[in-house]
Image: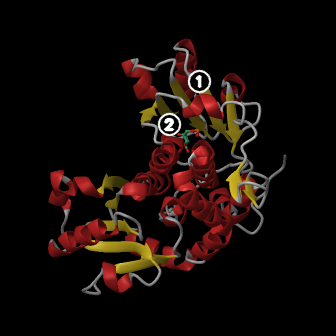
Amino acid sequence: EQINKGKYEHYMQKEIHEQPESLTTTMRGRLIRGGSCKSKSVLLGGLKDHLKIIRRSRRIVFIGCGTSYNAALAARPILEELSGIPVAMEIASDLLDRQGPIYREDTTVFVSQSGETADTLRALEYALENGALCVGITNTVGSAIARNTHCGVHINAGCEIGVASTKAYTSQIVVMAMLALAIGDDTISSQARREAIIDGLFDLPSKVKEVLKLDQEMNDLAKLLIAEQSLLVFGRGYNYATALEGALKVKEVALMHSEGILAGEMKHGPLALVDENLPIVVVATRDACFSKQQSVIQQLHARKGRLIVMCTKGDAASVCVSGSCRIIEVPQVEDCLQPLLAYHLTVLRGHNVDQPRNLAKSYTSK
Ligand code: G6P
């Protein structure tokens, strides 16, 4: 398949801007509004025969590398909430290094854009040997992970050429949110919550379109940061993954040191770094952690931190009382879908965006 960059300078840029369409494709035919007994639900054809077993699992274990791991981390809270099942996170190489326990009663979920990443594939062999149910979430039909898992969901995000994963990340989160909806589908008490999330998913492509209009603003911000040595990104709750993934993108594409920090851990080390020079991005959108993030901002501000705050539209005055922070506003969406909007951070430093130094799209060997 011949894919060109069209009007874009880089594949990564094109893939970022394709997200309203890629997300629509990911959800196509899977979200159902209307019908006889339930008004709104999710249908994941590749999982329907396994949902009963998944619901009876002792744990759900997400396994992946890099951006795919971060996508799973973003989806973990909603899966825990809707399924009531403990959700464990495993970086594939670390699980293998530790030979960590995997049980027959576990559902292991392998998340991989390429479906070929060597560590994730080896972790899959390990989980199969241990008798766990293995679910694949990949973007590549016929890939090794898609073939060797018991069941799974294709994310259908379309071909991703840029080494740094972008549209696959957002589609992975949507698939895992749909997985949470499907697993929790038999719980009456959470029906209203599930319906609100389904409505949120329907609205998502248009909200993402809105966020992509921030391109110029991001460009201005990138110019401000161009000569910096380092950047911290603070998040918590649903947006802890956003902090890790935002920092990873800055690292791998802009070749700038960057660290994603769980805001709840701020006092246990990171606060020592704060001064008037180091730029800090704080994700503080409206969710259950909002007031805690407000207090984090106040504490960073008290130490003269150079703050860039990403908040929900209309919240500028509540996140930055002094008016001294740089504000980036994103539209309001259901809390668990916020990582999809907050995730849009690019820094221009003149490096090869599509093929960063020393990195490969897919690591198929050690
Ligand atoms: C490489 C890529 C990353 C990707 C990771 C996992 O490091 O550069 O963008 O997140 O592999 O790849 P996978 O195909 O398993 O999602």
Q: Residue 275: x, y in percent?
A: 18, 68
Quarter holding ligand 1: top right
Q: Which residue is mark 1?
A: 133
Residue 316 percent location from the top left of the image: 38, 83
Image height of 105 relative to 212, above or below? above
Task: Please tell me which residue is depicted at 44% across the width and 33% down the height of the picture.
Answer: 91
Question: 148 above or below 254?
Answer: above
Image location (x, y in percent) of residue 168:
63, 50
- What amino acid is labelled 2 in the image? Cys
Q: Is residue 44 left or right of residue 80?
A: right
Above or below — where is 137 with respect to 161? above
Residue at 24%, 67% in the rendered image: 296
Q: In this view of the protein, can residue 349 be seen by the observer? A: yes
318 relative position to 4: left or right: left
Please name the residue shown 17% across and 51% down the image: 268
Q: Which mark is residue 65?
A: 2
- Distance from mark 1 CB to nearest ligand 1 atom below 8 Å: no
Q: Residue furthest right?
A: 1
